[in-house]
Structure formats: structure tokens, C-alpha cells
């Protein structure tokens, strides 16, 4: 299990290491995420294929620590833990599911390497193809339409269902809801212009890149666009490196649309790229507040705009709220998802892990995100990125 990374010390554990505080989105972390449906609030964030665990159905946010063995059987303890859960985010995971979850924190997932999006008329299109993936080897390209998956028409269906079918954990095809293993086949019905064809791909374990950096050199001065799809291990440092590599006076467009969350420590590191120390957020466990602080030395002068939407969740909301409350960024887009509860993990006999809600996190100004989300400074939908660039230009970061 990941080691502790927060200032709040973990309790004593009986077996294994204490867990890092984690904020995980509905489709978990490590996923190659795409954009949401046309309305931006249809369901969980659009993702290509999240990693192989059941956080797709029941996300968690968790903070330190395992409990002592109380002598109950694993089945009885798990049932009691599930009954005592306070909300929809509480869950019990098998040891295998939890192992997959930990792999997810390192960006690993089982799939075919596609990110998808739904158009205004309900079509499902390929938004991106991961290098070296089964999808790339099959010649699938961005803009191709996915008509069917294993013979089932997907036009008009929620993107989350499409994702589940791509990874093989949709309940109609896999009653246990578990992600498929590497090597399992999935048959896609595709369309490119008037051409229609079918192709069978075989899933494999992939490592998704959590950060994509693009320099928009047609601006004067240029703009660095940083797209973060999840806060898996190393994401915060990648963002900090991209900020440091930007040229003098170069504005930053931080795109957190569809970011389903991840390790909160990575979100704090990302905040440290733009802040000179100070409060990023607070979280409470059983009523006791714990601060999360940025490191000193961040770039506080570079123009910064943050793009968000209904798929911006958890750790991504924590980062957005910090930059907004601290007056460091202008936020553009639509209201974020609103996932800000904290779950505490307890190791159960037999290896299962119960995740039970124990508190919530708040922004530096004390705003509660859970159920409310973050409101942007400037509301924008289809033209959000263009409007964000216009705002950035007004801040002196590109024209």
C-alpha cells in the first residue's frame, strides 16, 4: 500500500503500511479520461478505460489507517462495515480489487487504449488513442465513431456505460462488475465517414500518461497548455516541471476537465507549482481538522487560467478551489462534480478493506465542496477553451 505522505501522522497499524489520503473520482484514477456528455452533468466523467477495480461504481477518498483485527470473520466484518457506511461513497473491497486500486494509483489499467466522448447528437467518438495500445495497432484514429461494442449499439448511451463495456466490467456482460483481464477480446463496430467496419481488439495492461503538455506557439507570448487527466503518482511533479519549463511571461492553461481525481498529495504538489506556501485545503477526520499546505517557492506571477467541467472531481476540485480562493487563477467552464467526502480504510480479516466516510475537505476559505462543487468565475461550455485563452490574454499570458 502507498506510504503516508501527509503531515497528519497515521495511527498504529497491525498489518501493512498506513494509507495515503486519497481523493478518487467515480471512475477512479489512472484512467485515460476524455470529455463528458453534452450537458456536462450527465454522469461520472467520461473516460477511455479506467483501471481494473470497482471504484468505477463506488469511488473512495481515504485517509490513513488500518484497524486491529477484532476476531470477526472477514465476511461478518465486511457486512458490518458496509452497513455502517454513511453514504454512497462507503464501500468494501476484496483484496484483489484493492490490489487493482493500488495499481491504478500508479496509472495502470486494463483496456484497449481509447478515450471517448459523446457528441451533441449522442454519437460516441474516439477522442484519443494511446501510443502502443491495441487500438493504435488496429488503426483506430481520433474522430472515428464507435457504433457498437460486442454487438450492442452504444449511440445515445452514457459514456460511463461505453467505458464499462470497453473494459469488460459492465454488469450485463460481467455480473460481478469486475474489470476484464489482459488478453480478453472486445469487438468494436466502427465508422469513419461512409466506411463501416468491425475489429476485435484484445485488452492489455497499459500505463496511462496523466499529464499532456502542449505549447501554443501561435500566441504572443506563447501559452503552455497542461492537461491533467488524473492525479496518479508523479502527476504533481510533472505539472510543476511544465510550469518551470515555460518561457518568461508565458501563460498557463491548466485543463482539469474530466479529471476524476487521485492522490491528494499530488494535487498539493501541483498547487505548489503556483503558490508560495500557505493553505491548500483542510480535511477533517472524526471532527478533527488537518491542514494541507503548499510548498514554498511556486510561481505566483505567471498568468493562470483553470478549465473545469462536470467531470472535474475530488483532488482536481481541491486544487481548483485552492487556486480560486487564493486569487491565483481564473476558473473557466461549468460547475464541478462536487465530491469532497473522506473515507477511512480499515483492513478486515481475510484481506478485504472497508472504506467508510468519516469527514469532508474544505477550500482555504472554508467552502464545502461535497454536493456543491466549484462554481467557475466565468461560465462556458462548448467554447470554454477559446474563452479561457481570451481570459489568459487579458491577464497578459498570450493574445
Image (tube, helix red, strand yellow):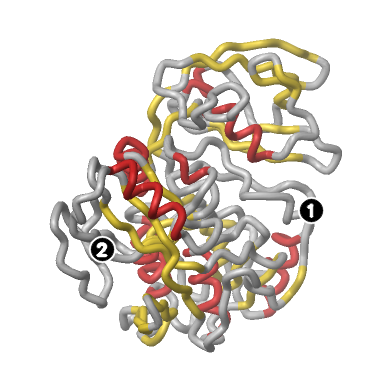
Which one is nearer the viewer's eye here, 247 or 214?
Answer: 214
Q: Residue at x 27, y 59 (%)?
A: 19
Q: Single out the mark in the foreground, 1 or 2.
A: 2
**For residue 187, which quarter of the picture?**
top right
Let me know if residue 395 appears in the view: yes
Q: Residues within 10 Å of mark 1 (few under 14, many from 20)?
A: few
Judged left or right of residue 290, residue 111 is right
In the rendered image, the vertical position of residue 145 relative to residue 90, given as above or below: above
Q: At numbered mark 1, what does the secondary structure look like: helix, strand or loop? A: loop
Which residue corresponds to mark 2? 65
**For residue 391, which quarter of the picture?**
bottom right
Residues under numbered marks 1 and 2 in contact, where contact means CB atoms less than 8 Å apart:
no
Which residue corresponds to mark 1? 39
Let me know if residue 245 appears in the view: no
**For residue 320, which quarter of the picture?**
bottom right
Looking at the rendered structure, the number of numbered marks drawn on it comes to 2
Q: Residue at x 73, y 50 (%)?
A: 42
Q: Residue at x 75, y 34 (%)?
A: 157
In terms of sequence position, does the residue under pointer 1 or pointer 2 come before the other? Answer: 1
Q: At numbered mark 2, what does the secondary structure look like: helix, strand or loop? A: loop
Which one is nearer the viewer's eye here, 147 or 158?
Answer: 158
> Disc 1 and disc 2: Cα gap in Å?
38 Å
The picture places residue 176, in percent across and down from the top left corner, at 49, 29
Q: Residue at x 48, y 48 (%)?
A: 28
Image quadrant occupied by the C terminus: bottom right
In the rendered image, the vertical position of residue 198 relative to residue 344, given as above or below: above
Amino acid at each position: 500500500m502507498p506510504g503516508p505522505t501527509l503531515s497528519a501522522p497515521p495511527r498504529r497499524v497491525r498489518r501493512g503500511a498506513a494509507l495515503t489520503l486519497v481523493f478518487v473520482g467515480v471512475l477512479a484514477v489512472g484512467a485515460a479520461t476524455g470529455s463528458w456528455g453534452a450537458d456536462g452533468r450527465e454522469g461520472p466523467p467520461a473516460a477511455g478505460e479506467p483501471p481494473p477495480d470497482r471504484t468505477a461504481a463506488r469511488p473512495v477518498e481515504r485517509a490513513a489507517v488500518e484497524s486491529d483485527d477484532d476476531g470477526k470473520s472477514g465476511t461478518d466484518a465486511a457486512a458490518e462495515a458496509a452497513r455502517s457506511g454513511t453514504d454512497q461513497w462507503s464501500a468494501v473491497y476484496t483484496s484483489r480489487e484493492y490490489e487493482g486500486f493500488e495499481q491504478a494509483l500508479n496509472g495502470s489499467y486494463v483496456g484497449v487504449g481509447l478515450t471517448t466522448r459523446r457528441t451533441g447528437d449522442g454519437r460516441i467518438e474516439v477522442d484519443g488513442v494511446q501510443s502502443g495500445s491495441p487500438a493504435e495497432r488496429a488503426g483506430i484514429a481520433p474522430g472515428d465513431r464507435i457504433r457498437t461494442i460486442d454487438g450492442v449499439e452504444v449511440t445515445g448511451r452514457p459514456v460511463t456505460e461505453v467505458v464499462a463495456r470497453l473494459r469488460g466490467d459492465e454488469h450485463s456482460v460481467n455480473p460481478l462488475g469486475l474489470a476484464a483481464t489482459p488478453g480478453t477480446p472486445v469487438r468494436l463496430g466502427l465508422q469513419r465517414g461512409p466506411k463501416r467496419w468491425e475489429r476485435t481488439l484484445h485488452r492489455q495492461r497499459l500505463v496511462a500518461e496523466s499529464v499532456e503538455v502542449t505549447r501554443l506557439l501561435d500566441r504572443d507570448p506563447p501559452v503552455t497548455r497542461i492537461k491533467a487527466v488524473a492525479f496518479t503518482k508523479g502527476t504533481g511533479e510533472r505539472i510543476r516541471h511544465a510550469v518551470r519549463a515555460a518561457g518568461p511571461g508565458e501563460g498557463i492553461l491548466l485543463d482539469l476537465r474530466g479529471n476524476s481525481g487521485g492522490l491528494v498529495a499530488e494535487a498539493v504538489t501541483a498547487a505548489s507549482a503556483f503558490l508560495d506556501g500557505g493553505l491548500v485545503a483542510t480535511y477533517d477526520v472524526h471532527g478533527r481538522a488537518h491542514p494541507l499546505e503548499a510548498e514554498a517557492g511556486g510561481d505566483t506571477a505567471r498568468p493562470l487560467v483553470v478549465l473545469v467541467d462536470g467531470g472535474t472531481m475530488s483532488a482536481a476540485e481541491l486544487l481548483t478551489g485552492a487556486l480560486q480562493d487564493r486569487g491565483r487563477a481564473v476558473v473557466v467552464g461549468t460547475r464541478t462534480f462536487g465530491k469532497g467526502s473522506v473515507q477511512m480504510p480499515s483492513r478486515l480479516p481475510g484481506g478485504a478493506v472497508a472504506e467508510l466516510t468519516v469527514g469532508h475537505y474544505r477550500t482555504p476559505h472554508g467552502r464545502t465542496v461535497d454536493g456543491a462543487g466549484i462554481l467557475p468565475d466565468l461560465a462556458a461550455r462548448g467554447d470554454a477553451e477559446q474563452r479561457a485563452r481570451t481570459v489568459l490574454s487579458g491577464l497578459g499570458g498570450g493574445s
